[in-house]
Each structure stands twice: as C-alpha cells, then as structure tokens.
Amino acid sequence: MALITYLTRIQFDFGAIKLLPDELKLAGIARPLLVTDKGVVAAGIAQRISDAMQPKPLAVFDGTPSNPTEAATKAALTLYREHGCDGLVAVGGGSSMDLAKAVALLATHPGELTQYMAVEGGVARITPKVAPVIAIPTTSGTGSEVGRGAVVILEDGRKLALISPHLIPRLALCDPELTLDLPAKITAGTGMDALAHCVETYLAPSNNPPAEAIALDGAMRVAGYLERAVQDGKDREARWNMMMAAMEGAMAFQKGLGAVHALSHPLGAIQPLNMHHGTLNAVVMPAVLRFNAMINGIGPKYARLKRTMGLDEGTDLADHVTKLNKRIGLPSGLRAMGVTEAMFAQVIPHALKDHTAATNPRPLTAENVEHLLRDAM
C-alpha cells in the first residue's frame, strides 16, 4: 500500500477501501454524509463503501447529476444539516466529488454559492473552516480527489469553478478495484479528461517544473494504458495506471490549464445537451493543439510531449489525438455531440472569462475562440 502525502493524504492501491474506518477517524468525521449518484448506487459500489465505513453514513445523497448543479448542492446541504453531519464521503466521478466540496463549503460559510466562485472574487472568501471531505473516485479522469477546485452549474446557467486549497479533500482514497466494471465509453471519456489535464498543465506558460514532471508522467501512463483499459476493463495493470494518471493530472494542474477547459466548461453548461466534460475535452483538444502550435518557442515542448507519449518525432500531436478519439469510440466533433453554430454566442464570452483561459499559452480573444469552436465542430 503506497501512502503519499502531496497536496493531501492519499491512499492508493487495490483494496484501499478497507482503510476507511481508520481514515474517517484521522479526518475527524464522526457523522458522515455519503454523496454519490444513482449510477454508482445501481452498480453496488455505494453499498460497498457504506459497508466498509465505520461509523456508518447518517444519510446518503444519490442525486448528483452528471454535471453538478447549484440546485443539487442545496438539496444535499439540506440533508447534511438535517442529520447533523460533520463531514462528507464522496463516491463517484468528478461530479460527486465536486458536489461534495460545494456542500462542505456552504455547510461552513454563509451566503450563496455564487459569491465563492473564482471569477466572482471568491477565492479569498473561502476559509479553512470548510467541512472535511474524503474523496473516493470510481472513474479515472477528473482527479478531483486531489484537486483544489469544484465546477458547478449555477442557477443562472453559468458553469463556474470554486477554487481554494481549503477545498482539497482531507483524503483521496484511490482503489482501482472500483473501476474494473466501468463501461468502455466512460473509460474513454474520463481517460481523455486525464490526458487533457496533463497536456494542458505541461503546456501552460507558468513556471512549475515539479508540476510539469508529474504531468509528463501522467501523459505517459495515458498513452500506454488508456486503450488497454477501454478494450478490457478487467485489465488490472491498465486500471491502476489510469487511476494514477488521473490523480497526477490533478496534482499537476495547480500550475494552470488552458483553452481546452476554457471551452469545455461553458459548452458543458449548454442545456439540454448536458455533455460529458471529459468527452468535450477530448473533442476540442485537437483544435487547441493546432492553435497553440503557432506560438514561437512551443516546439520543444511539443517534441518532449511526443517523446514522453512514445510518438515518432514527425507525428502531428493534434492528428494523433483525433485518431485516438476515433479508436476509443469518442465523437468526431462538437457537431456529433449536438452543438450548433447558433450556440457559439453563449459560449464565447464565458470561455473568455473562464479561470483557465488566463494560462493558455496563446492569448484568447473572441475571434480566436470562435475559430477554435469552428475547428472543433
């Protein structure tokens, strides 16, 4: 069993869920709320976690939507308060973990969620009082189990991020056993989310060599194991490495992300499409790679990324991602996901304001965001 302390406490290996009783004590959680979604409940995973917990959860909130919303956050918060809970155990993909973080914030901070969003100046308003969260991922993509952010669709329709080191879960309990029955489509979309985190972090212009090293290691693991995990979900080596890659992507993206996420966040807020975040990242990534390749001096980074991923020197990185998407069964473009040109007007302003836009290697304008959207169609 590998105990890693980087950003937060991490327990990582097959069978890690057996450590839950001791870890709940260490986190100071005596009256937990279990936060999950109906798919995780139907798969029997929520019950496995509940059975492993001591103390048992006082209540279970299984209403997490595929993209967490302010309304669902309020519903879970009501349950938390009704049962006098003092912490949360989040089980699922990034949506359940992000929703749990939002509940942990509102349980200890006054007012509405909007005021705590990063683009609303909320970073400074989030204090260490945030309720403790234990995060247990059941997919290998977002890395939210070690992330300092939570992305939520507000009641005004905006998809925005909460960002604070105080939102990092007290424990990331990573058990690849929980991913062995994950369907191929979800494996593919979440795996490309992990790749997007690693690639964007590495290319972000800020100076953070440790984060870049972690991002490169994560990209190497995705390149070596994602297709194996999609083809055979029971491949334990592939599942272990994909969960590690996802965690590394979030460990690294403290450095910053870029235009892939600046586009996918507002695209993901479009209703009623309700598009999967990782799949969106996969679909827009080739366009962003072509766009950023135009910057002077980016060539050596592209070359190192290709070497790390085991690609030939002459490989076009954007073309490689396009072909990879096709091989693992992801959509060919935004149009195939239901996006139309008429939706661009609502996406462009929010992409420019997104917190990830500032760390894209090439500055974003309304004109080139529209270009990126058209290229990704």
Image (cartoon, grey):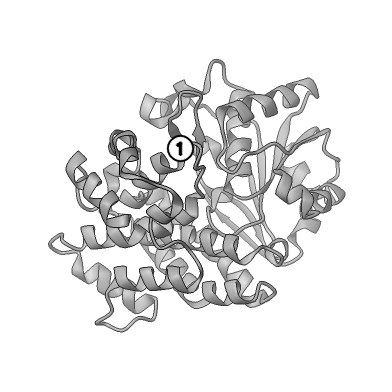
Residue marked by disc 1: 269
Q: Quadrant of residue 315?
A: bottom left
**Disc 1 residue type (three-letter):** Ala
Q: Which of the two residues, 119 or 228, is positioned nearer the viewer here?
A: 228
Q: Can the viewer see residue 334? A: no
Q: Quadrant of residue 247?
A: bottom right
Q: Secondary structure at mark 1?
A: loop
Q: Residue at x 52, y 60 (%)?
A: 189
Q: Residue at x 57, y 47 (%)?
A: 94
Taking the image as shown, residue 66 lies to the left or right of residue 327, namely right
Looking at the rendered image, the quarter that the N terminus falls into is bottom right
Looking at the rendered image, the quarter that the C terminus falls into is bottom left
Crowding around mark 1 (Cα neighbors within 10 Å: few <14, some 14 to 19, many 20+) is many
Query: Would you place residue 373 above or below residue 65 in this image?
Result: below
Picture coordinates of residue 359, whole percent (x, y):
28, 47
Taking the image as shown, residue 252 lies to the left or right of residue 289, namely right
Q: Which of the two residues, 11 or 225, is positioned nearer the viewer here?
A: 225
Picture coordinates of residue 369, whole percent (x, y):
24, 45
Picture coordinates of residue 211, whole percent (x, y):
39, 58
Q: Residue at x 31, y 49 (%)?
A: 259
Taking the image as shown, residue 42 lies to the left or right of residue 258, namely right
